[in-house]
């Protein structure tokens, strides 16, 4: 049985992650996984599996809410969800078999890319004159599930980060519809990823469950605060934090080994 102190720490961590996830408007896993690796000493697969415990209920609730407000056509929902879930299963099985250091470096590269993408998004972009919108046939929308599912299975995050801009940029969907379809992809994919990581014994339930509970109680407060803060400055600083965290996650194990050998 987990001690009372363990539960208090997990609840406090989950509350903080839910709050800052709401403030920055990005999935809690992007913050949770580096924290679990750097602060709690988890290896990369265990951190990704544990973070999924917190992410799954939030994603399912978000999907339900979005689908009520902006219902997507069921054939597209089922197509993108099925392909994403199947791809997630294959990639999660591969991820849990990778050496933790290899998976950590892959995650660091992905985190740096997310941070760089957020940084670039702050700059105004002028579309080229006559640039076509929605170039691809909508029947290919389910294929976005392959890319989103690959990210969810391998990294435990990023399905929505990849799917939403693809749906708006490649297929010309409105933002609300793109986010609704992206959630139809990542919600079942996150459930599949969690089940696969759990089957490989890569989930710390005693840490993940109280984190999930506390995070659902604080995310709304984070969103409320975000509406009163300057969005441009907020997202720019968060992008810098992600890029800095990716570098720190990459070099910290070698620094630890060097310090240990130097004693």
Image (cartoon, grey):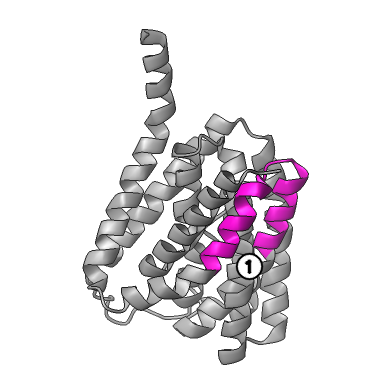
Residue 61 at x, y = what percent? 61, 76
Magenta region includes residue 10: no
- Of 31 and 126, nearer the camera is 31
- Which of the 4 image quarters holds residue 204? top right
Q: Is residue 235 left or right of residue 137?
A: left
Q: Is residue 86 left or right of residue 159?
A: right
> Crowdedness of circle 1 by 10 Å Cα count: few (<14), some, many (20+)?
some
| SS for callout 1 | helix
Residue 129 at x, y = what percent? 27, 80
* Residue at (45% x, 45% y) in the render: 35
Q: Is residue 80 left or right of residue 111?
A: right
* Residue at (39% x, 62% y) in the render: 20
Mostly what secondary structure, the magenta segment? helix
**Residue stretch in magenta:** 189-216
* Residue at (44% x, 27% y) in the render: 253
- Of 84 and 243, nearer the camera is 243
- Which of the 4 image quarters holds residue 237? bottom left
Residue holding disc 1 = 57
The quadrant of the picture occupied by the C terminus is top left
* Residue at (67% x, 45% y) in the render: 203
**Rendered view: 214 above or below 90:** below
């Amino acid at each position: 049985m987990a001690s009372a102190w363990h539960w208090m720490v997990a609840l406090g961590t989950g509350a903080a992650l839910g709050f800052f996830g709401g403030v920055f408007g990005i999935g809690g896993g992007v913050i949770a996984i580096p924290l679990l690796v750097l602060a709690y000493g988890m290896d990369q697969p265990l951190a990704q599996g544990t973070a999924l415990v917190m992410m799954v209920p939030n994603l399912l609730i978000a999907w339900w809410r979005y689908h009520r407000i902006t219902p997507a056509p069921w054939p597209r929902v089922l197509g993108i969800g099925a392909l994403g879930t199947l791809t997630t299963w294959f990639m999660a099985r591969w991820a849990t078999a990778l050496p933790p250091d290899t998976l950590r470096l892959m995650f660091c590269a992905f985190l740096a890319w997310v941070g760089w993408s957020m940084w670039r998004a702050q700059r105004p972009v002028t579309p080229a004159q006559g640039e076509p919108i929605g170039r691809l046939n909508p029947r290919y929308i389910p294929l976005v599930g392959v890319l989103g599912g690959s990210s969810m299975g391998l990294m435990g995050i990023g399905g929505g980060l990849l799917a939403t801009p693809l749906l708006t940029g490649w297929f010309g969907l409105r933002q609300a519809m793109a986010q609704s379809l992206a959630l139809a992809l990542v919600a079942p994919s996150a459930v599949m990823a969690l089940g696969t990581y759990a089957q490989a014994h890569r989930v710390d339930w005693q840490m993940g469950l109280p984190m999930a509970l506390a995070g659902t109680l604080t995310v709304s407060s984070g969103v409320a605060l975000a509406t009163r803060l300057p969005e441009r400055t907020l997202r720019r600083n968060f992008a810098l934090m992600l890029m800095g965290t990716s570098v720190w996650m990459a070099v910290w194990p070698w620094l630890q080994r060097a310090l240990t050998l130097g004693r």
